[in-house]
Image (cartoon, rainbow, N blue to C red):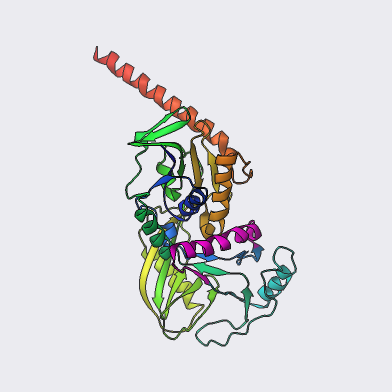
Amino acid sequence: MIDYIIVGLGLAGIAFCEELEAAGKNFVVFEDNSQKSSTVAGGLYNPVILKRFTPVWNADEQLEVALPFYEALEKKLQTQFDEKLAVMRRFADVEEQNMWFEASDKPKLSRYLDTKLITNTNTAVNASFSMGRVKETGRIFTGKLLKAYREYLQDKNYLRNESFQYDKLKISGDSLAYQNIQATKIVFCEGFGIKQNPYFSYLPLNGTKGELLTINAPNLQVATVVKSSVFILPMGNDTYRIGATYNWEDKTNIPTEEAKQELTEKLSKLIQCEYEIIDQVAGIRPTVADRRPLVGTHPKHAQLAVLNGLGTRGVMIGPTVAKQLYNHLTHHAVLPNEINIKRFEKRYRKSVTKEHDDKRSAENAHRKANSNQK
């Protein structure tokens, strides 16, 4: 008997595994590499929404948990993947400058917005109205983190590189069984993969496709993140990641020509130097309509839990909501209403009713077919 089965090893899965390790719990993780959002993510932690100059939801609390979390993880894995990196917001006009100063006076933003404007001296960057610097920002090299953590779990024999087959999960009493594994609880951290999960597919996880380019631009010489209608993220050796697109219809991880064109058109308004596109990647962000995570236990089966819906800010949100879920499952701590999946209980009841009606319709059709044959 083990304590937990974890399905999915993106940012959410890693954060929950760390809660289990810290508490001395034993577990096994199933990961089939089908979801790419954590792998291709820019990995920024930034407490300000720079389109409207508004604070990220619960930014103070999330940074308070996330920064020590990644620092401890770097020591544990003996790998550096947290880089303190300034984020610069390019202003399109004087009106945006004024909006920046107004925002910097607000209690939740004064800590993060530097009121000293930065004059642009980089001739490769089009920023004639200066830039504003966001403080307490940085970047997690998510690909590097995921690789190191998977190797760590493999060394401990905690990782199963295979797809989880829902029909083989057996639930009974206070425990559950999967293949030859007996466990007390299972936590699904599948990202957009939750749409195939029969226990939690009723949750309104929409999924937003995001695409990014990687370019080589020796003359760009940018050492910070530059944010405009796209962001420029320096990756070292004259390479930069450019993102990102938002597509609510396409649910594949296949890069598209349309996204490439959109990014290059926006980039042309931000920089004025030659560059070469050397890569393009895509992933489905696990987004929710109300922009809040999906955390909690199944309405009928308390042994089944979900940790999902981290959206575009998984680096910041993941460690906090993982801790909240662990405390809820272990110590019966109350989950905040805004993240608790109980807010979608009506959807669950409707899904159960529909499933019952569909089953009855199928049975009636089967009886009618048999009757006609007679």
Q: Is residue 304 left or right of residue 373?
A: right
**In the displayed image of the protein, which residue is found farthest to the front?**
24
Eyeballing the image, is 131 above or below 12?
below
Taking the spot 41% from the left edge, 84% from the top edge, the residue there is: 218
Q: Which quadrant: the N terminus?
A: top left
Eyeballing the image, is 95 above or below 183?
below
**In the displayed image of the protein, which residue is found farthest to the top?**
374
**In the displayed image of the protein, which residue is found farthest to the left?**
373
Query: What is the tally of numbered marks visible in this picture?
Result: 0
Mainly helix, strand or loop, the magenta region? helix
Residue toward you, 352 or 5:
5
Q: Position of residue 274 (x, y in %)?
A: 41, 83
Q: Position of residue 319 (x, y in %)?
A: 54, 55
Taking the spot 69% from the left edge, 80% from the top edge, the residue there is: 116
Question: Which segment did they paint magenta?
Answer: 55-83
Eyeballing the image, is 252 above or below 111?
above
Q: In this view, does 105 lie to the left or right of 232?
A: right
Taking the spot 60% from the left edge, 58% from the top edge, the residue there is: 65
Q: Which quadrant: the C terminus?
A: top left
Check residue 212 for magenta coloring. no
Check residue 67 for magenta coloring. yes
Residue toward you, 195 or 181:
181
Q: Position of residue 372 (x, y in %)?
A: 27, 15
Q: In this view, does 9 lie to the left or right of 350?
A: left
Residue toward you, 69 or 310:
69
